Image (cartoon, grey):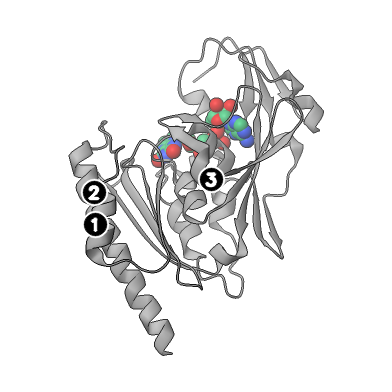
Amino acid sequence: MDLSTVTRIIPARTRSDLIALGPTVVPLAGGSELFADPRAHLRALVDLQTLGWPALTITEDGLEIAATCTLAELSRLPMQAGWAAHPLFYQCCTALFGSFKVWNVATVGGNLATSLPAGPMITLAVALDAELLVWRGDGSDEVVPARQFVTGNMTNALAANDVLRSIRVPLTSLQATTAYRKIALSPLGRSGAVLAGRVDADGVFVLTVTAATLRPVQLRYSELPAADVLAGDIAAIDCWFTDAHGAADWRRAMGLLLGEEIRAELAASTDVASQS
Ligand SMILES: Cc1cc2nc3c(=O)[nH]c(=O)nc-3n(C[C@H](O)[C@H](O)[C@H](O)COP(=O)(O)OP(=O)(O)OC[C@H]3O[C@@H](n4cnc5c(N)ncnc54)[C@H](O)[C@@H]3O)c2cc1C
C-alpha cells in the first residue's frame, strides 16, 4: 500500500543520518510491515539498508546478525563446526509464512521491532539468549537481553528515535542442542504457538514460549525438569491471549503439549549424546 503522507525517503549512510528519526519519521528496513497498513502520521522514512551493514558476522564469541539481515539471508546461514543449534535458524525463519517476496525483504530487526507475538525472530533471539544492541537516539548504545526487549503485543524497549543495530548470539547457545515446535490454526496461517527448547553443554534447560503469549516467556532450569514440574510452570504463565489466530485456552493447551514434546525430545537426544 502507498504511504501517501510520506514525501521523503532518507538513505542513511552513517549513524548521524539517524538524527532525522522521531514521531513522524521512522526507520525503513524491508518495508513488509510498514507498507501493510495506512500510517497517516508519517512524513518521512529513514532507509537503514543503505547503511550497508554485513548481514552475518561470525566471531570468536558467536554470531552477530545485523538488524538489516533478511530472513532469506538468515535462512542460508552456513553451518559451522559444533553449532548444534544451527537447525533452529531455518526453523524460525519458516515460522514466518510469507512468500519468497516477503522473505527477501523482511529483516530480522524489522521483525523484532514490529514485536508481534508471532514474530519468529523474537522466538529465535530469546531461545538463544541473544543480546540486542540498541542505538539510542541520544547517541548512546545499550545492550538489551532479547528476553526483555518485547514487552507486549507490538510494544518493546525502543523509543521513537532508537534503532536496533544488531543481534548477538553467544557461542554457548550456538553449541546447545535445540528442539522446536510450531502450530497454527491453518496450514499457511500465522503461528498460534511457537516454542523452542535448548540444552546447554552444562545441562541448563531453557524453554521459550512465544506466539501464544502477549510477550515471550522464558522458563529456565539448571537441568531438564521432570514433566510435572515443567507442566506446572507452563500452566502458571499469565499472558496467554486470544485473537483471530487462536483462543487463549487453546494456546495454553498447545503450550503444555508442545512444551512436553520438547522436553521429551531433548531428554532423549541428550541421553543418546551422554551414552556415545
Ligand atoms: C504475507 C506476510 C506475512 C507475514 N507474517 C508474519 C509473521 O508470521 N510473523 C510476524 O511477526 N510478522 C509477519 N509479517 C510482518 C512483517 O513482514 C515481519 O514482521 C517483518 O519481519 C518485518 O520486517 P521489515 O524489515 O519488512 O520491517 P519494516 O516493515 O521495514 O519495519 C517494520 C517496523 O519496524 C521498524 N523498524 C524496522 N527496522 C528497525 C530497526 N532496525 N530498528 C528500529 N526500528 C525498526 C519500522 O520503523 C517499522 O515500524 C508478515 C508480513 C506479510 C506481508
Residue 10 lies in quadrant: top right
The x and y percentages for residue 19 are 76, 22
> In whole angstroms, how far apart are the C-alphas of marks 1 and 3?
24 Å
Residue located at (49% from left, 50% from top): 126
Of helix, strand and loop, which one carries label 3? helix
Alpha carbon of mark 1 to alpha carbon of mark 2: how far? 6 Å
Q: Position of residue 182 (x, y in %)?
A: 32, 52
Quadrant containing the C terminus in the rendered view: bottom left
Tag 1, which secondary structure? helix
Pointer 3 residue: 146
Mark-to-mark CA distance, 3 and 2:
23 Å
Q: Earlier in the sequence, mark 3 or mark 2?
A: 3
Mark 1, residue position: 231
Taking the image as shown, residue 50 lies to the left or right of residue 91, namely: right
Marks 1 and 3: CB-CB under 8 Å? no
Q: Nearer the viewer, mark 3 or mark 2?
A: 2
Q: Looking at the image, which is closer to me, 209 or 188? A: 209
